[in-house]
Image: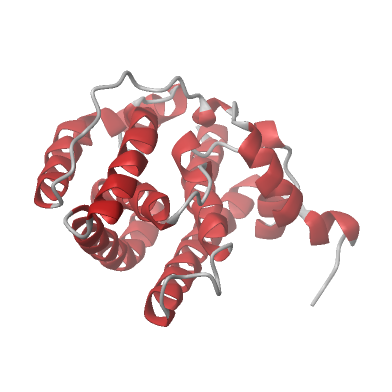
Amino acid sequence: MKEQLYSYLLMLGDNSMILAHRLSELCGHGPSLETDIALTNISLDLFGQVRNFFQYAAELKGGDCTEDNIAYLRTEREYYNCILVEQANTDFAHVIARQFFFDQFQYLQLKQLEKSSDETIAAIAAKSIKETRYHLRFSSEWMRRLGAGTEESHIKTQAAVDRLYPFVDELFTASAIEKALSDAGIAMDPGTVKAEYEQETKTVLEEASLILPDAAPRFAQGKQGMHTEQLGYILSEFQYMQRAYPNMEW
């Protein structure tokens, strides 16, 4: 159970970490100063959540394991984030659609994890959900603005929805670890919030004059360590300093 809990914490942290890194790539490139700062702050919020999950994971692992080791010194196959969060910052519409699809899931997940029988996970969820509530409000409002805005913004946002929504199904496909820990009252079985997610997502998209694509889910096994080539590029940048200067200290 301890090893399963460790892997689950990596799963939770990796989703937030990879998305936070994607958002950090936009620093200084937002469409307006206010939006640029907002995206940067969301990135920082997510990195804060990552630290909480990885500090707990390092405590469970013991020995010389640290949050930095976990974040920077794993190979690509040892990351368990969903494929959705590693998708590229194609344009602003893609950034917002990716954020919205993840935020909606993350909010529902944290609501469930607040009830976890693991007191540390419950405490992290209770702290993180306050930030995630704001993230969801931000991305939802931008989905409405872009979808119901100009003809060009509508076309680009619909294209982003069509491109990214097929990756959403992976969020609700429970891994063996999630199933085992949900049975123990520690984790959330993601399938239990799928109906609520779909209803909430559909409501926002309808308000934005956007349509969910009639497309089959994309085959994705990020939770099993199988990723797109994009994660390799992310890690080459993300891990550079730690690998170039091992055991560096600020």
Residue 171 on image: x %, y %: 36, 34
The residue under the point 43% across, 68% down is: 39
**Figure quadrant of residue 22:** bottom right
Q: Position of residue 37 (x, y in %)?
A: 44, 78
Q: Is residue 46 left or right of residue 234?
A: left
- Name which residue lies at 50% across and 49% down: 90
What residue is drawn where x is 32% and y is 18%?
216
Q: Looking at this view, name the residue that lies furthest to the right.
A: 245
The relative height of residue 164 versus residue 33 in the rendered view (above or below) is above
Along the line of sight, the residue nearer the viewer: 204 or 32:
32
Q: Nearer the viewer, residue 123 or 85?
A: 85
Residue at the front extreme, as displayed: 151
Left or right: residue 137 compared with residue 243: left
Residue drawn at (81%, 61%) of the image: 241
Q: In the picture, which quadrant includes the C terminus?
A: bottom right
The answer to which of 169 and 191 lies nearer the viewer is 169
Tell me, yes or no, if residue 65 can be seen here: no
Residue 209 visible somewhere in the drawing: yes
Dividing the picture into quadrants, the one containing residue 176 is top left
Number of marks in the rendered image: 0
Q: What colour scheme has been applied to the protein in the rendered image?
A: secondary structure
- How far across and how far down the image is residue 59, in percent? 61, 54
- Tell me residue 148's x, y (percent): 16, 56
Q: Is 173 on the left or on the right of 54, as rendered? A: left
Horizontal relation, residue 126 to residue 72: left or right: left
Instruction: Identify the residue at the far bottom of this view.
Output: 33
